[in-house]
Amino acid sequence: MVKAAVLYKPNEPMPIVDLAQDAPKAGEVRVKMGAAGVCASDHHVMLGQTTFPMPIVLGHEGAGVIAEVGPGVTSVKLGDRCILSFVPSCGYCHSCRTGSPQVCDTNRLTGTRQYDGTFRLKDNDGTDVHQFAKLGVFAESIIVPQQACFPVAEDIPMDVASLIGCSVTTGVGGVINQPNIRSGMTVAVFGSGGVGLNAIQGAKLLNASRIIAVDIHDHKLEFTYKFGATDVINSRSDDPAKKIMELTGGGVDFAFDTFGGAITTEQMMDSLRKGGTGVLVGLAPEGMTADINMVDLVRNQKTLTGSYYGSASPHETFGKLVDFYRKGLIDIDSLITRRYPLEEINEAYDALGRGEDGRGVIMF
């Protein structure tokens, strides 16, 4: 049996329950969880803004230790400390073979089931329990594909490793892996949550000449200076696109919407200079659309693109980020402002919903 937080219905607290957990099958491992990040993507599911089958163990940002290996596992061994990828790519589909494992077709098709289409968790009445992103890290231990595991050394703390599993990779990677971005460019980041703070760090890594943070909370904007913001704009009191035009003399080269909303995406595109690129990083609620000025897009030769999980192979980005962390080029420790036991997971998401600074982490 394993303790886990299970979501049975949207907009209801997640109880901590005991689940039966099968042994790992071929190519799978059991991971004893060390830490799990409190991410907004899970919150969307809790609020019913993103549809997933239930009951489900949420959580996709985590790190732990390999406690058991199934038949045929070769990439990790017992005792390895691992960052977990929420896209454990198959390696064989069209997306994987053409260099985009972060959008693996097989992973998307199998969803919350393991790669053989079956489950590893059941509750007391025998009901199959889904694992968010094949992980479901809000549990004491999890069964996952070996491809989800990226081994790291002892010098990387578990809480730091867990954030590399999602918010650091999504934010920093979404900036540094953009094909046309260059040192010295001007950058705006819409949203100052965990991903936004890391996008700011990514821009700082590239020596952006100006990094403008946009949010609706003054306390969160103040927090962005710690990670490299040079200017801040409260979009409740100022029109951010107009203010960015004034600050830069014509708009930024790159803008990133790390929140994922119609208004923020529209503001992002309006803040670009001619030839600028807007990158949509945050996941919007299902069905949401943005009103993009098509004439502006053509006449001013702007680009709108999406970035999923850092826009590149998660494992390759993990390796870069671990190196950056060791060298002091990115600050992950300061992102963590709250720590909770698993039993306080609902309180952790209440804090996220209130817009508190930084990232909360569940410690096991």
Image (tube, rainbow, N blue to C red):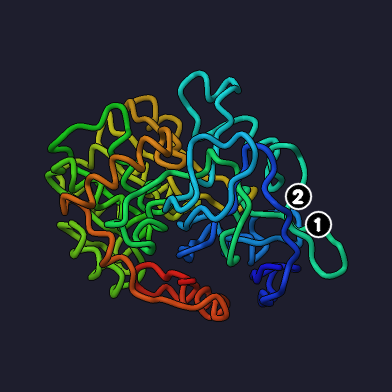
Residue at the location (34% across, 63% down)? 215
Q: Quadrant of the N terminus?
A: bottom right
Residue 80 vs residue 279, the one in the foreground: 80
Compared to residue 222, the image places residue 94 above or below, namely above
Residue at the location (12% across, 44% down)? 209
What kind of element bears circle 1? strand
x and y percentages locating residue 24 in the rendered image: 67, 48
Compared to residue 232, the image places residue 219 above or below, namely below
Q: Earlier in the sequence, mark 2 or mark 1?
A: 2
Tell me which corner region of the image, top left, top right, bottom left or bottom right, holds residue 303: top left
**Left or right of residue 314, residue 244 in this image:** left
x and y percentages locating residue 78 in the rendered image: 50, 50
Residue at the location (67% across, 37% down)? 26
Residues under labels 2 and 1: Cα distance?
A: 6 Å
Q: Residues within 10 Å of mark 2 (few under 14, many from 20)?
A: some
**Left or right of residue 128, residue 200 in this image:** left
x and y percentages locating residue 332 in the rendered image: 28, 60
x and y percentages locating residue 91 in the rendered image: 55, 26
2 and 1 marks in contact (CB < 8 Å)? yes
Residue bearing mark 2: 119
Residue bearing mark 1: 128
